[in-house]
Image (spheres, helix red, strand yellow):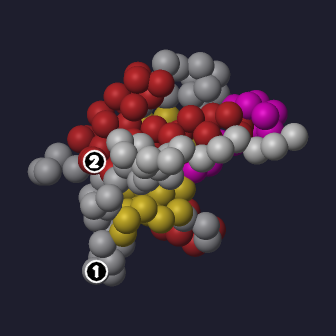
Amino acid sequence: MKPPEAPSSDAGIVPPAVSSCPGVKMGVLRKRSDFLAAARARRQGTSSMMVQARDRRDGDGMVRVGFTCSKKVGNAVARNRAKRRLRAAAHEVLSKCGQKGWDYVLIGRADVTAERPFEALKGDLVYALKKLHPAS
């Protein structure tokens, strides 16, 4: 079997790996200490998630985000599905509404995060960010 031929002209074709948030650097929280620090900071609950936010005050212009779901959300498949949906919503919303130098932790809720319509999920995140950053 022969692979398909590549198009001869690249005019008007946008590569699929183009970042939708060119102005904001996004990072991922990986260390437990970062999650614990965010847990001691501000938080805002919505119907589909809990959002924790912390100003790092380190002068770094990066927005960092972490995701977690407890076993109350369900088995591993349900938790991973909820986290994928939170990750997709965060990628779209935090690139526009997230503040540089802040850490965000998104916590999934049982039976809601995986089932809520995606536009409503994004709306919940925008609402939480507006409550967490009232002056902006």
Q: Give x and y (percent) for residue 5.
A: 65, 44
Please say whether residue 71 is one of the residues in the magenta stretch: yes
Classify mark 2: helix, strand or loop.
helix
* Residue designated by label 1: 59
Q: Give x and y (percent) for residue 23.
A: 28, 61
Classify mark 1: helix, strand or loop.
loop
Residue 56 visible in the current orientation: yes
Q: Which residues are magenta?
A: 67-78
- Would you call the spot at circle 2 few (<14 residues within 10 Å), some (14-19), or many (20 or more)? some
Front residue (pair 44, 26):
26
* Residue designated by label 2: 96
Q: Which residue is at the far left?
A: 135
Placement of the N terminus among the 4 image quadrants: top right
Judge whether 97 appears above or below 48 on screen.
below
Kind of residue at disc 1: Gly
Which is closer to the viewer, label 2 or label 1? 2
Would residue 17 be found to the left or right of residue 41 on screen? Answer: right
